Amino acid sequence: MLTVSYHVVSAYDHDPTVDNSEQPRPVIRPTWFYAVGNALFGYPAGREDAPATFDWSSAPGIGFASDLEHLAG
């Protein structure tokens, strides 16, 4: 098993508006975040089709909603 951890850096230092937002760029704010999966997750070169898991932890006070929840069952 390979375990990887990394930090995602926000593309903005403010709440983006419709005029200056680009959907695939991550937005990390003090009380919420937004990221598109293919821009958020990394993978080893040549292993794009290998199975992987995602665990969410260590975010007190931040809710979680994701399409990843549908993959479990």
Image (cartoon, helix red, strand yellow):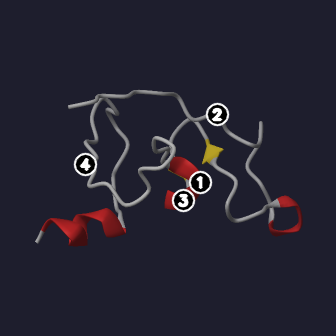
Q: Nearer the viewer, residue 67 or 50?
A: 50
Q: Which residue is mark 4?
A: 53
> Cβ–Cβ below 8 Å for labels 4 and 1?
no
**Amino acid type indicated by mark 4:** Thr
Q: CA distance from mark 4 to mark 1?
A: 16 Å
Quarter of the image with the N terminus is top left
In the structure shown, which secondary structural element does the residue marked by tag 4 occupy? loop
What type is the residue that disc 1 sits on? Ala
Q: Residues within 10 Å of mark 4 (few under 14, many from 20)?
A: few
Given residues 47 and 73, the one toward you in this image is: 47
Residue 42's spot in the image, x, y percent? 50, 44
Indicate which disc residue 6 carries.
none
71 to the left or right of 61: left
Which label lies toward us, 2 or 4?
4
Labels 1 & 3 near each other (Cβ < 8 A): yes
Tell which circle, 4 or 3, labels the residue nearer the N-terminal end. Answer: 3
16 displayed left or right of 54 = right
Q: CA distance from mark 2 to mark 4?
A: 21 Å
Q: Quadrant of residue 3?
A: top left
Residue farthest right in this picture? 19
Residue that carries the numbered disc 1 in the rendered image: 39
Cα distance in 3D space between marks 4 and 3: 14 Å
**68 w.r.t. 3: above or below:** below
At which x and y percent is residue 55?
25, 42
State left or right for residue 68 relative to residue 32: left
Q: Residue at x 57, y 35 (%)?
A: 8
Q: In the image, 46: left or right of 26?
A: left
Q: Which residue is mark 2?
A: 9
Gap in angstroms between the C-alphas marked 1 and 3: 4 Å
